[in-house]
Image: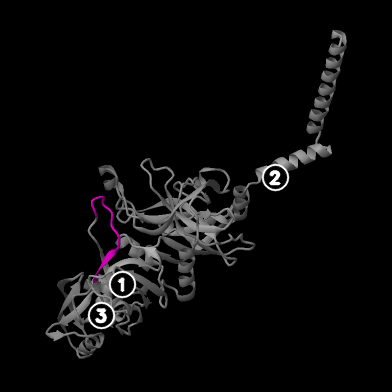
């Protein structure tokens, strides 16, 4: 083919491609064209990932929990100690996060977020401020339940921590910046479920134990506490609680309380006004670790007489390997099982050397169901039984246990809840009724009463001055 013809054909192809490309670019830049709209729709659909959809579903119900604390002012210098008036008070502010879980305004957050609060205000994602009241707090599980009053409250969809898969998406939603930013929209971070059923021992005096936690590498920072851990379906699976960090910031080791536990605690407070955990009646101890520091199972160190464990013929020295399907590698694993037990729940125990699973039923703590004797409207007494002795680990086999006492009477008498009165003057006290009868016999008399009591497995005496 002649060179001129080949050149002419090449020029034609180049002109065609240039014209087509120009038209394509023009169409993409013109929002009115069908091809442009389709392209934008395709891009928007690709941007709306599962994380985006899940965040949009839950974020409106994640709130900022703002706390004011009033405490005694402590002088920081000698000069301040001279000028501060006696009993001077100072206020401090703190913040965390929370999740609205019901249309009637129930908010779940961490106990450590609201501890010591004199006033709590909840800020919704849209900026609306609402006063909050405390329904109940559980320092053991680090859960607090609040209530707010308002119309058209957003509610977070709630899922379950059961069946979580290691490596599935996890989204942390909270307010790590609190009031340091102009808007109140929550922050979203994403990662995966790193582990489940983690037991966390305290690293300082200011932190407590956490049992059966969800571990995630989604960034959790101070201020995120009480916020939501969410799955890819847009369901709350946990309440963010703590991090492990050398720097104080997120290092990919975040932990959340399973939402099932948080909801169970909320239900207890709403239905009964208290946490109704259950009793099995055994204490456990660690077994000796192997050369690599590993342990498997726990050893029963004590079985309370008349307890469910006693009825199931468990004995001190038995080795527990699993409880309700969860492996036990140390006493913390056992405490994690107990944390979620309620009266009437079944407990399946796998013992070393046993061909079968031992089944028993958890019961209410004996001290919660025992009859109470009230004295002077300020003190409630319970008769010590073998079950209560086993529950509380008391040395005394009998006596009058102080179940409740007013702060005023504690200040006047130095008696406190948990003390066991075993003798007053020369009279042996074997029950709550004995204590009541002792004071009834003093009607019209006055004088000094020496009280002998057990406290923390030690014995003490204190004096009361009686005017009948």
Q: Dot 1 lies on which element? A: loop
Residue marked by disc 3: 305
Q: Is residue 141 magenta?
A: no
Which is nearer the eye, 320 or 42? 320
Tell me if residue 292 is in the magenta stretch.
yes
Q: Does the image show residue 410?
A: yes
Secondary structure of the residue carrying numbered label 2: helix
In the image, residue 202 sits, relative to residue 381, either above or below, namely above
Q: Is residue 261 above or below residue 85?
A: below
Q: Which residue is mark 1?
A: 354
Residue lying farthest to the left in this orientation: 426
User: What percent of the width, then of the height, locates residue 248?
Assistant: 39, 43
The residue at the far top in this view is 3
State the residue in front, 209 or 266: 209
Spatial separation of the CA atoms under disc 2 and disc 3: 64 Å
> Residue 212 got which mark?
none
Which dot, 1 or 2, sits closer to the camera? 1
The magenta region covers 290-301
Alpha carbons under labels 1 and 3: distance apart: 22 Å
Mark 2, residue position: 45
Q: Which one is earlier in the sequence, the residue at label 1 or at label 3?
A: 3
| Marked residue nearer the N-terminal end (1 or 2) | 2
- Give the main secondary structure, helix, strand or loop, of the magenta stretch: loop
Asked if residue 40 lies left or right of residue 4, the reply is left
Above or below residue 307? Residue 216 is above
Q: Earlier along the polypeptide chain: callout 2 or callout 3?
A: 2
Which residue occupies 44% across, 47% down?
222
Q: Quadrant of residue 377?
A: bottom left
Q: Secondary structure at mark 3?
A: loop
């Amino acid at each position: 083919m002649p060179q001129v013809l080949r050149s002419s054909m090449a020029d034609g192809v180049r002109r065609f491609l240039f014209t087509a490309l120009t038209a394509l670019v023009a169409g993409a830049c013109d929002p009115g064209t069908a091809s442009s709209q389709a392209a934008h729709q395709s891009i928007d659909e690709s941007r709306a990932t599962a994380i985006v959809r899940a965040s949009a579903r839950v974020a409106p119900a994640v709130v900022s929990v703002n706390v004011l604390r009033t405490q005694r002012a402590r002088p920081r210098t000698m000069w301040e100690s001279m000028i501060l008036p006696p009993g001077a008070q100072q206020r401090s502010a703190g913040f965390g996060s929370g999740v609205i879980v019901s249309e009637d305004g129930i908010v779940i957050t961490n106990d450590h977020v609201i501890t010591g609060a004199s006033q709590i205000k909840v800020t919704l994602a849209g900026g609306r401020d609402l006063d909050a009241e405390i329904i109940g707090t559980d320092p053991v599980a680090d859960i607090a339940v609040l209530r707010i009053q308002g119309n058209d409250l957003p509610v977070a969809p709630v899922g379950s921590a059961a069946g979580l898969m290691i490596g599935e998406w996890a989204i942390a939603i909270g307010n790590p910046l609190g009031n340091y930013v102009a808007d109140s929209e929550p922050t979203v971070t994403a990662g995966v479920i790193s582990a489940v059923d983690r037991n966390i021992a305290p690293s300082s005096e200011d932190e407590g134990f956490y049992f059966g936690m969800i571990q995630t590498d989604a960034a959790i920072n101070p201020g995120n506490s009480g916020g939501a851990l969410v799955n890819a379906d847009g369901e709350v699976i946990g309440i963010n609680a703590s991090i492990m960090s050398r720097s104080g910031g997120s290092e990919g080791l975040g932990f959340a309380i399973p939402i099932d536990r948080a909801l169970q605690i909320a239900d207890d407070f709403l239905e009964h006004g208290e946490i109704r955990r259950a009793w099995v009646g055994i204490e456990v101890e660690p077994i000796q670790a192997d050369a690599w520091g590993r342990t498997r199972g726990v050893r029963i160190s004590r079985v309370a007489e008349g307890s469910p464990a006693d009825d199931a013929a468990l004995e001190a020295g038995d080795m527990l390997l699993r409880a309700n399907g969860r492996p036990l590698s140390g006493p913390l694993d056992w405490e994690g099982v107990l944390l979620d037990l309620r009266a009437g729940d079944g407990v399946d125990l796998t013992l070393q050397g046993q061909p079968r699973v031992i089944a028993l039923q958890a019961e209410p703590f004996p001290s919660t169901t025992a009859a109470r004797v009230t004295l002077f409207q300020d003190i409630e007494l319970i008769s010590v039984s073998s079950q209560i002795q086993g529950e509380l680990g008391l040395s005394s086999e009998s006596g009058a246990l102080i179940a409740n006492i007013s702060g005023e009477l504690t200040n006047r008498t130095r008696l406190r809840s948990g003390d066991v009165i075993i003798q007053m003057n020369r009279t042996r006290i074997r029950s709550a009724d004995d204590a009541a009868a002792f004071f009834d016999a003093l009607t019209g008399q006055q004088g000094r009463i020496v009280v002998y009591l057990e406290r923390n497995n030690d014995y003490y005496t204190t004096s009361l001055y009686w005017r009948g």
